[in-house]
Amino acid sequence: MGRSQETFNKKEVKNKKDKKRKDKEKKRLERKDNDRPSSLEDMMAYVDENGMITSTPPDPNKKKAVINSEDIEISIRKQEDIPYDPVRKGTVSFFNDSKGYGFIRDAETQESIFVHINNVLEPIKEGNLVNFEVEKGMKGLTAVQVKIFKDKIV
């Protein structure tokens, strides 16, 4: 006699497929029964006076606060004029005499500012404390009117 063509594994796969199909059909029927369209009132949302979304409609008898538009002031606060000192102080971090350029480290902002030999009033070298003014150059800030800082003793 021959063996059955339907093996245990094939039966299990068939049973799983049938069970899955029945579960799917059952869920579909449940969704169909429970998914009745809700009323328009249930779908409405309201915004209260604070801007929050609520499900209750606003009270029509409640008085709104009246704001006079002339009382609203729109302006920008004036900033105090800070006296700007164009003369800055810094240290020469690098200076090449042969090429005629260098960099000054600003004492306030710690920025590195380019300096050219043409803008130097006195001979400077690395490590000198100098006074200078800043101008906008082609490639960034440039130090001009550079001279060695001399502490004034009173």
Image (cartoon, grey):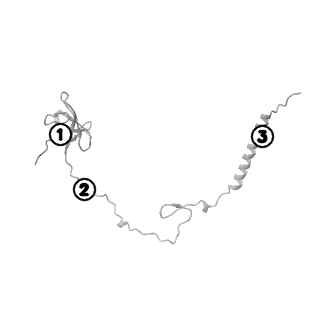
The residue tagged with tag 3: helix, strand or loop?
helix
60 vs 125, nearest the viewer = 125
Q: Nearer the viewer, mark 1 or mark 3?
A: 1
Q: Nearer the viewer, mark 1 or mark 2?
A: 1
Residue 80 — which label?
A: 2
- Residue at which label 3 appears: 15
- Return the x and y of residue 137 as percentages of the image width and height: 23, 38
For the image, the number of numbered tags is: 3
Instruction: Name which quarter of the figure residue 131 lies in.
Output: top left
Q: Which amino acid does label 1 sit on?
A: Val
Which numbered disc, 1 or 3, marks the residue that appears first in the sequence?
Answer: 3
- Return the x and y of residue 116 as percentages of the image width and height: 19, 34
- Return the x and y of residue 70 as percentages of the image width and height: 35, 67
User: Residue at the spot x=69%, y=55% of the render?
Assistant: 34
For the residues labelled 1 and 2, the Cα–Cα distance comes to 29 Å
User: Residue at the spot x=18%, y=39% of the render?
Assistant: 129
Q: Do the residues labelled 1 and 2 touch (CB within 8 Å)?
A: no
Circle 1 crowding by C-alpha within 10 Å: few under 14, some 14–19, many from 20: many
Q: Which amino acid does label 2 sit on?
A: Glu
35 vs 119, nearest the viewer = 119
Residue 113 — which label?
A: none
Residue 38 in sight here: yes
User: Residue at the spot x=75%, y=45% of the render?
Assistant: 22
Which numbered disc, 2 or 3, marks the residue that appears first in the sequence?
Answer: 3
Extreme residue toward the left, this view? 154
Q: Are marks 1 and 3 in contact (CB under 8 Å)?
A: no
- Residue at which label 1 appears: 130
| 43 vs 62: above or below | above
For the residues labelled 2 and 3, the Cα–Cα distance comes to 85 Å
Q: Which of marks 2 and 3 is in front?
A: 3
For the residues labelled 1 and 3, the Cα–Cα distance comes to 92 Å
